[in-house]
Amino acid sequence: MSNSRLLQLDREHLIHPVVNFRAHEKKGVTVLKSGKGAWLTDIDGNRLLDAFSGLWCVNIGYGQTSVVEAATRQMSELPYATGYFSFGSEVAIQLAAKLIELTPRSLEHVYFSLGGSDAIDAAIRYITYYFNAIGQPQRKHFIALERGYHGSSSNGSGLTGLPAFHDNFDVPRVNQHHIPCPYPYRSPVSDDPQAIIDQSVSSLHEKVNELGKDQVAAFFCEPIMGSGGVIVPPKGWLKAMQNACNDLGILFLVDEVITGFGRTGPLFACDAEGVEPDLMTVAKGLTSGYSPMGALFMSDEIYSGIADGPNASAVVGHGQTYSAHPVSAAVALEVLRLYIEGGLLANGQAVAPIFAQRLEALSAHPLVGECRVRGMLAGVELVANKETKARFDMALNLPERLGRIAYDNQIVFRAFADSILGFAPALCFEESEFEFLFDRLTLSLDSLLKEPDIRAAV
Ligand code: PMP
């Protein structure tokens, strides 16, 4: 099919996630055709260095043939097995056991979803069930962070703390609340890391006290606010939030959908601070995007509360046709093997300092306010004024323009609405690829700065 026909059919029929519908029709789709390692090729034959791993998910890089073989084997042997009515598949059970071995010690049970949004949705439903089952039905309130992202399910989108996911969708619901996110670069309190941590802890205490201590079910957070602009809290923040939840007697859910599977260095961001949450969600890196799958982990206390409450004889009515899908489970097992035995986790850790050095050098660029990084996850915040940290006027449409210039320079990353750039290179990235990425990124920022309206704005 010709490119122009594809563009036309896309415009006419395909609804894309998170776009302005009419602006997308005008811009048109960019059709990607193939991938190998960290490189993509589009339908016009352009080669592009993908510094965002698709949507921060293809942690192992493209074209890993052993994963394709694992999927093919499973598809030939048994393409589908339901998890309903106590059926199951060998691979799903093996995957569950392997993940419980690798995740924080507090987590003993896992429910497999199709991605992150429905893992979060499952968490909300199981937590609600749990408190009803243990005789605390009044615990209906959920707290999350402004700028947090917990997917776009009809319930989880309310815990997401980004206006585009709320406006006109009638969320957050009355039982969903947000506290400010720890944002060191723009902290209203102070630059001091401990003061930023203390501020978050006291915001959580205040919110719980305002709602009523026995009315709150749980607090949800990401270790690093990904879609909110790769905002990296000070070291020790996650542990402090766990302690605060323990002190307040509410459940603590860590959303590792982006940070899981080596993205920040260790296998999970929780590992860096010895955090043991009551619940944890993952997706993306679990299968590295080769097949859809997410997971919700929970403690034995929650599982047993659901299992043994006064409702002990009831069927727990939560599930999806494709929960614990065997092909995705086979893919995840092979992806895990590549991280650990295949050395990809170690490679990510080995090249992360090169990434950090390059980002440090980029901080000197006149458009760059701050570069923040943990492992293979980084945010670059562009500002109109480095002194005052003033943001660019949205009307300049800077992210879109920079994205286009970068594409012409053969690099792909994420440009968020408030001029924050997101980077999540695959763990297989090599030194030469960082060189290419930062040379082309600097070139792109220089070109942008030459445009008269941008020059006038700085
Ligand atoms: N939680 C976090 C932290 C995420 O980053 C995302 C996706 N970007 C989700 C949940 C939702 O996952 P999915 O898009 O797979 O539904």
Image (tube, rainbow, N blue to C red):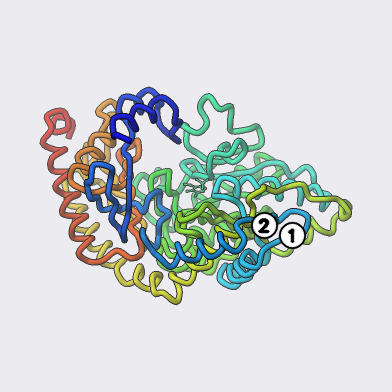
Front residue (pair 93, 255)? 93
Nearest to N terminus: mark 1 or mark 2: 2
State yes or no: discs 1 and 2 in contact (Cβ < 8 Å): yes
Residue at 67 percent of width and 39 percent of height: 211
Q: Amino acid at mark 1?
A: Phe
Quadrant of the snapshot with the C terminus: top left
Q: Which label is found at residue 209?
A: none
* Number of other residues with Cα within 10 Å of mark 1, as a class: few under 14, some 14 to 19, many 20 or more: few
Q: Position of residue 179 (x, y in %)?
A: 53, 42
Asked if residue 274 is positioned above or below residue 407 in the image, the reply reads: below
Q: Amino acid at mark 2?
A: Ala
- Left or right of 452 on screen, residue 141: right
Q: What residue is disc 1 on?
A: 87
* Number of other residues with Cα within 10 Å of mark 2, as a class: few under 14, some 14 to 19, many 20 or more: some
Q: What residue is disc 2 on?
A: 81
Asked if residue 195 is positioned above or below residue 137 in the image, the reply reads: below
Q: Position of residue 347 (x, y in %)?
A: 34, 71
Front residue (pair 73, 82)? 73
Front residue (pair 328, 280)? 328
Residue at 67 percent of width and 67 percent of height: 108
